[in-house]
Image (spheres, rainbow, N blue to C red):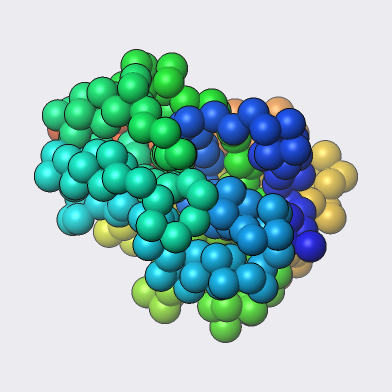
Amino acid sequence: MPWEELQEQAVAARLLQSSLAHDRIAHAYLFLGPDSGGKKTASRLLAQALNCEEGYPCGSCSSCYLIASGTHPDIQVIKPEGRFLRLDQIRDLCQRAGNTPLLGRTKVYIVWEADKLLPEAANHLLKILEEPPAATVFVLCAKHRQTLLPTVVSRCQEIWFKPLVPETAARELEAIAGCSFEEAHLAAYLAGGDLAAAKNWVDKETLTKCSQFIAVVKELPQGKGALFKAAETFAQAPAEFLPLLQAWYRDLLAWHAGAQENLYYIGHKEIISQMAAYYDTAELIHCNQAIENTCQLVFGRINVNVRLALEALLVQLIAER
């Protein structure tokens, strides 16, 4: 059955199926969650269910086929052009929404990355959500509701899509990215199960940084020389290196807690066990808090000397051992 495509999103699937079964279709939905969480699949299945010749998404009738191929005249997907969704795009959507369906029973307008709506575009969209045309359903897809106008959110039925379980994301990432399972496993955990975000962690340049990180961090217990080398390396790309450091010390603490089977760095258990021996549990708790404080400092302020902040952090990490 087509709905099995959403087996990782059972709650979202049940909500949509229940609405269809009881003929309680909202005029507007807000699908929230990571881009890789199934929002695109759910949007397609909903559009197919509303227009399927069999009354449900059979996947084989002409309507289902056209929707799956992106060529159905009554289904339109609106995406940002550049960084934002602009007013002219939403005006065009609203104009089309006033027409009667050309082929199917229901027109479906899917607004991808709705959290990138410019204010004037969002206000224009709000007008049609307040007075929706007949035989029309809007599906807004976004990562977070906080970035949308509250009035737009209030006109939609919210359905949340959870991130993939990291192990599931790792298996999918390994298959599509051609990386090792160990690399995919780390990327999936760093991205919190968001497959789209995890892909950014397994490109060639980032994997090189991961290798640099491992080479540098395992030398930290050796003292000040390793400290300054690490600070110099990490300062080149703090957005990549700080999350790697945070995950590393999280694993050291997990090792101390006896959770050796729940590591992010599953390919480096020997190094982790050796380095964990330099600390006790209380020291590792302090280390993890110090890393979190530095992340907030580096990523939360514009004028901060990243190199000095990292040196101060690494001094703390070494002093704790």
* Residue beneath the point at 49% across and 56% down: 104
- Position of residue 317 measured from the top left corner of the image (x, y, whole percent): 52, 40
Seen in the image, is 278 located left or right of residue 298?
right
- Position of residue 55 measured from the top left corner of the image (x, y, whole percent): 69, 53
> Is the residue 67 above or below the residue 181 in the image?
above
> Is the residue 179 above or below the residue 267 in the image?
below
Query: From the image, which quarter does the N terminus lie in?
Result: bottom right
Residue 254 in view of the camera: no
Q: Quadrant of residue 36?
A: bottom right
Most foreground residue, 142 or 293:
142
Most foreground residue, 174 or 249:
174
* Residue beneath the point at 57% across and 72% down: 62
* Residue beneath the point at 55% across and 66% down: 63
Query: From the image, which quarter does the C terminus lie in?
Result: top right
Most foreground residue, 77 or 119:
77
Most foreground residue, 264 or 75:
75
Residue 259 in view of the camera: yes
Residue at far bottom of view? 178
Seen in the image, is 197 located left or right of residue 310?
right
> How many numbered marks appear?
0
* Residue beneath the point at 71% across and 28% down: 282
- Position of residue 46 measured from the top left corner of the image (x, y, whole percent): 59, 49
- Position of residue 192 measured from the top left corner of the image (x, y, whole percent): 59, 47
> Is the residue 137 above or below the residue 274 in the image?
above
Seen in the image, is 111 located left or right of residue 264?
left
> Is the residue 188 above or below the residue 293 in the image?
below
Q: Quadrant of residue 16?
A: top right
